[in-house]
Image: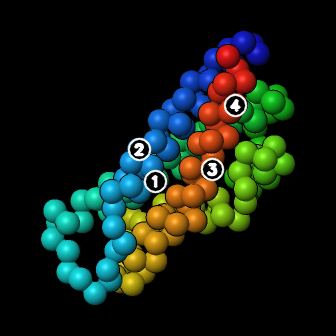
Amino acid sequence: MRDDQQILTKASLNKAIDAINLVEASLKEVKPFNANKIYTPKEREPYDALCDRFIRAVEISLKYFRSYEKLMYGEISETLRDLLNRMGKLEIISSITLWMQMRDVRNRIVHDYLPEEIKDMYDEIMDAFGKELLRLKTKLLKLSSNDE
């Protein structure tokens, strides 16, 4: 059973790294959002791609956390906060609060907001949230190399 969980966890880790790589590619290309500008649909595409990639990276990372938790502890937390607390204790994430905010952005992105609020979300993704995902990628790459 442990061997099966190791295989699942390794596959999940690789998916998380791949998803974060896509966020990283978007972060390198996207420019700061101007709330006063009326963007054409074509001009909005890089921001939409960044948001989609960000949401996917967060969700895939959370799936990895659940798999890693099961491998390490033999059980899965009942709440997201408990899962994030464990990942914090293992020093995989830097802040439980930040990850709760990152997860919340997923819900905010799908609703219509004023341009200033949209700008704030993009700014968060391009700054603190993006940095956290890149930090996580570094951590995951180290875990991946330890498995080999």
Tell me the amino acid under the disc marked 1. Answer: Phe
Tell me the amino acid under the disc marked 4. Answer: Leu
**Which residue is tagged 1?**
54
Q: Is label 4 in a helix, a strand or a loop?
A: helix
**Which residue is tagged 2?**
22
Q: Can residue 83 be seen?
A: no
How packed is label 1: few (under 14 Cα within 10 Å), some, or many (20 or more)?
many
What's the mark number on residue 143?
Answer: 4
Residue at 33% of width from left, 61% of height from top? 30
How packed is label 4: few (under 14 Cα within 10 Å), some, or many (20 or more)?
some
What's the mark number on residue 135?
Answer: 3
- Would residue 43 be found to the left or right of residue 4 on screen? left
Q: Earlier in the sequence, mark 1 or mark 3?
A: 1
Q: Earlier in the sequence, mark 4 or mark 3?
A: 3
Location of residue 48 by image quarter? bottom left
Q: Earlier in the sequence, mark 4 or mark 2?
A: 2
Q: Is label 2 in a helix, a strand or a loop?
A: helix
Q: Earlier in the sequence, mark 2 or mark 3?
A: 2
